[in-house]
Image (spheres, helix red, strand yellow):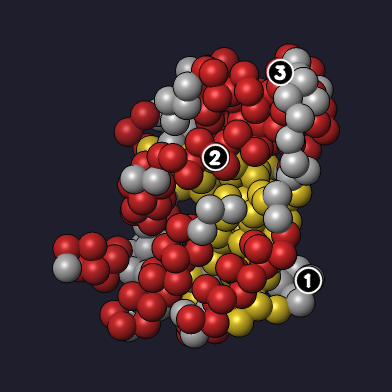
C-alpha cells in the first residue's frame, strides 16, 4: 500500500531485535531444542531445524550454543520442558495482536504477557478470538534492490509460493505453511537472501493509525511485549504511514 512500507516496519523491527542479541540467542536456543525434540537432530531430514540453524548463523549465534540446544533436544543434556504457546488480545485503537512465546514456565509467561497488555491499555482475549483476523503463512520479505522482480517470481512461484506482493521497496512472498521450507530452499539455491523469513500470522485486514500519540502507544506496547524474555514474535493488524513512523523514530 502506498505510504505504508512493510520494509520500513521490518527494518525498524530488525534494528530493535539486533539490540537484544542476548534475548535472540535464548529464543533461538529454545526453538532449536523444540525442533530437535519434534523432528530429530539431522537438519537434512528436519526442515524446521534447518531453518532455525540458518537464523542462528545469520544472528552470529556461537556454534557451542547451537550444539548445546541440539543436545537438550535429544536429551543428551537434561533440561526443563519447553512449550510453544500463542496468546491473543487487543491493543490500543482496537488492534488485534497475536503473541508467540517459547517458555519453560507457562504461569510466569502468561502473567507477564497479561500484565503488559493491561499496562499498555490492552487486554488478553480467549483462544481463537482472532482466528478469522489472521492467517498462518510462510512469509519472506526481500529488499527490491537485491533481485529483479521477474527472477524472483520465477524462483518462488515454481517452488510453490502462493503470492508475491510488490511494495515500494520490498517484495513479500507468501506461502502455505507446508510449502515454507520448499520455497526457503529454492531461495537459498538461487542465492536470494531474504531480509526476513518466518512462519507468520498475516492479518486479513489492517487498521491504519495516523494519529501520532496513538501510534506511539501501539509501538510502545509492541516493544514492551518484545522485551519479554519468552516472547518470540508479535503480530498485529496495524499500519502506520511511513512519514509518521519516520517522525516518531527521529524524536
Q: Is residue 135 visible?
A: no
Instruction: Report which residue position mark 3 lands on.
Output: 43
Quarter containing the N terminus: bottom left
Quarter containing the C terminus: bottom left
Q: Where is residue 51 in the image (x, y as percent from the top left)?
A: 63, 28
Instruction: Report which residue position mark 2 lands on.
Output: 26
Counting residues from the start of the chain, the first of labels 1 and 2 encountered is 2
In the depicted structure, whether residue 12 falls above or below residue 56: below
Q: In which quarter of the image is residue 160?
A: top right
The crowding category of the residue bearing disc 1, from other C-alpha atoms within 10 Å (few below 14, some 14 to 19, many at least 20), is few
- The CA span between labels 3 and 2 is 20 Å
Q: Which of marks 3 and 2 is in front?
A: 2
Residue at 72% from the left image edge and 59% from the top image edge: 106
In the rendering, which numbered label is found on residue 82? none
Residue 148 versus residue 176: which sits nearer the camera? 176
- The CA span between labels 3 and 1 is 32 Å
Instruction: Report which residue position mark 1 lands on.
Output: 127
Q: Position of residue 82 (x, y in %)?
A: 74, 44
Counting residues from the start of the chain, the first of labels 3 and 2 encountered is 2
Amino acid at each position: 500500500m502506498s505510504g505504508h512500507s512493510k520494509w520500513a516496519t521490518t527494518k525498524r523491527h530488525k534494528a530493535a531485535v539486533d539490540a537484544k542479541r542476548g534475548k535472540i540467542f535464548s529464543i533461538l536456543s529454545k526453538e532449536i531444542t523444540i525442533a530437535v525434540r519434534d523432528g530429530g537432530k539431522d537438519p537434512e531430514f528436519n526442515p524446521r531445524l534447518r531453518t532455525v540453524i540458518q537464523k542462528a548463523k545469520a544472528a552470529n549465534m556461537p556454534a557451542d550454543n547451537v550444539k548445546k540446544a541440539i543436545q537438550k533436544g535429544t536429551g543428551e543434556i537434561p533440561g526443563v520442558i519447553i512449550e510453544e504457546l500463542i496468546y491473543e488480545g487487543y491493543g490500543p485503537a482496537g488492534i488485534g495482536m497475536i503473541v508467540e512465546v517459547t517458555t519453560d514456565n507457562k504461569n510466569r509467561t502468561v502473567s507477564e504477557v497479561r500484565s503488559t497488555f493491561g499496562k499498555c491499555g490492552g487486554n488478553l482475549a480467549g483462544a481463537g478470538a482472532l482466528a478469522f483476523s489472521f492467517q498462518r503463512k510462510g512469509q519472506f520479505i526481500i529488499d527490491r534492490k537485491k533481485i529483479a522482480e521477474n527472477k524472483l517470481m520465477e524462483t518462488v512461484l515454481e517452488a510453490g509460493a502462493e503470492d508475491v506482493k510488490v511494495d515500494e521497496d520490498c517484495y513479500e512472498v507468501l506461502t502455505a505453511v507446508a510449502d515454507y521450507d520448499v520455497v526457503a530452499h529454492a531461495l537459498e539455491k538461487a542465492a536470494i537472501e531474504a531480509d526476513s523469513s518466518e512462519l507468520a500470522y498475516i492479518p486479513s485486514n489492517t487498521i491504519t493509525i495516523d494519529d501520532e500519540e496513538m501510534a506511539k502507544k501501539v509501538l510502545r506496547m509492541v516493544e514492551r511485549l518484545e522485551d519479554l524474555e519468552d516472547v518470540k514474535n508479535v503480530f498485529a493488524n496495524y499500519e502506520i504511514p511511513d512519514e509518521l513512523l519516520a517522525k516518531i523514530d527521529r524524536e
